[in-house]
Amino acid sequence: MTAPRQRAADSAADDYGRNLSGASVLVIDDEPGMRNFLTKVLEPRVKRVEQAASPREATQKLDGAHFDLLILDNLMPGIKGLDWMDEQRRKGFFGDTILITAYADLETAISALRAGVSDFVLKPFRANQILGAIERTLDRKHLRRENALLRRELYANNLRGEMIGKSEALSAVHSMLKKLAPLPTPVLFLGESGTGKELAAGHLHEMSDRAEAPFVAVNCAAIDPDRIVAELFGVVDDSGQLKQGLFQLADGGTLFLDEVAQMPAQLQAALLRVLEDKKVRPLGAEREIPLDLRFLFATNADLHKAVEEGRFRMDLYHRINVVTIEIPPLRRRSEDIVELAARFMEQFSNTLGMPALDLDEQTLLKMRRYDWPGNVRELRNLIERSVILGDFPEEFAGSGAVKGPEAKENLDMVVQRHILHVLDHCGGNRAEAARRLGVSRKTIDRKLAAWEL
C-alpha cells in the first residue's frame, strides 16, 4: 500500500474508533499475527483488550472476567468458533460477537446468524473494517438498551422536572446534592410521600459524571414480588437468550430504588450481595456479570423501626444508610408554593391545550395556608384537575382583583402570606408567631388589623 493510501486508511480507522472507549474486547484466534494485529489496533481505542489463542483459553478468560465483545475466528484446532460460542451462550455469555473467517459460505453465514453473531468480517481485512464492525455492533447494543428504557419510561409515565423553589430548606438539599454529585457513595433519600425524592435523585444523577448514562428508577412496591428478582437481575429464557434486567439496563449509570422498606426478603439478600460484589447473576445463568452502577435509595418509612421489627435486614440497612438526605415536606418550604403553583399552571395549560386559570391573591393565600399532606404531588394534581375542570375547588377559589405576576411578587402580599402561614403553624398564637418571625407582637397585631383579620 502506498504512503498516501496508508495514511488515508489510518485516518479512516481513527474515525471509526472514536466511540469504543468504554468497551472490553476479547480476541480469540489461533494465529499470533492476527491476535497481535487486532490488539495493536484496539488497545488505544478501547477500555480493555485481551487475547486467547484457543477456545479453551478463551473459556478461562470468560470464567474470570466479563467482556462486552468477542472477536472470534471460526476455524480453530479442535472446535469451530460457532460451536464454541453455542457452548458459551449456554453457560451464560451474553456479550456481542463478531466472527472473522477466511472461509465464508452461505451455510456458515446462516449458522452465524442462528448463533446470534452480531457481524461477519472476511479475512483479510483492514483496521477500519474491523473497527467499523465493532462500532456498528456497540451502537446496536446501546440502541437496544435505550429503546428498552424508553419503553419503560413511557409505560411508567415518569415525569421528571426541575426542583422548583428558593426556600432555605430546599437550598440545603441542593447544597448536599452538589457535594455528593462527584462521589460514588450510595445515598438514602428520606421524606414523606410526594415530596420529590425521585426528582432529587434524578438531579443528583444529572450533576454527576454519569449524567450521559441511564437513570433507572424502580418502585420496589410496584413490582410483583414473584417477578422482582427477574425484573432486576434479568433472566435466561428457554432458548438461552438473556432478557436483560434493570441492573444491566442501567449499567454505567444510576439505579434508584424507591420504597426500599417494602422490598421482599429474598431481594434484600440478593441486593446486599450485589452491593458488596458489584456483580449480578441473571436467573438461569452460570456466570456473573460485573456492574458499574451508582445506587440511590428512598423510602417514606422508618427503616430503623423496620430493622427492629425484623422486616428489613440490618446488614443491608447499614450498607445503604451511608449518607441520608431528607427531602422537606411542602409545609416546611411553603414559600415555594406560589412558584410551584405558577409553574404547574403553565405546564398543564400548555400540555393539555386548555386555558390557564388566574392565580389571584386570594387563591395564592389559601394555597399558602393549606397544610398539603400530599406535598408537591398533591399541589401538582390540584392544578392539573383545576385546569381540566376550568375552576379551582371551593376551598381554593378566589375572587381577588390582583392577579398574575403582581399577585405572586407584590411585597405586601408575600409578607401577608408568610405571616399568616407562620401564625397558622403556631395555632393562632401571635406571641409565638412573632418570636419565630423575629418581630414584635405589636408588629403582628398591626399587620392583622391592616388586613382586617
Image (cartoon, helix red, strand yellow):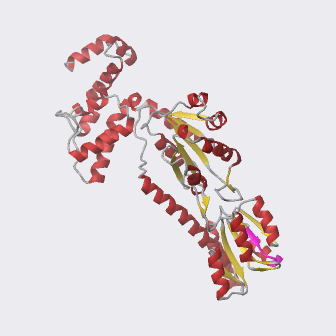
Q: In the picture shown, does residue 343 fall above or below 50? A: above
Q: In the picture shown, does residue 316 fall above or below 274? A: above
Quadrant of residue 397 within the rendered picture:
top left
Provide the residue span drawn in magenta. Answer: 26-33
Q: Position of residue 19 (x, y in %)?
A: 61, 66
Image quarter where the N terminus lies is: bottom right
113 or 351, nearer to the observer: 113
Q: Residue drawn at (66%, 59%), measured in percent from left and top?
A: 284
296 or 91, nearer to the observer: 91
Image quarter where the C terminus lies is: top left
Q: Residue drawn at (61%, 53%), measured in percent from left and top?
A: 233
Q: Where is residue 25 in the image (x, y as percent from the top left)?
A: 71, 66
Q: Where is residue 410 in the image (x, y as percent from the top left)?
A: 26, 32
Q: In the picture shown, does residue 173 fall above or below 41? A: above
Residue 446 in the magenta stretch? The answer is no
- 135 vs 36, left or right, is left
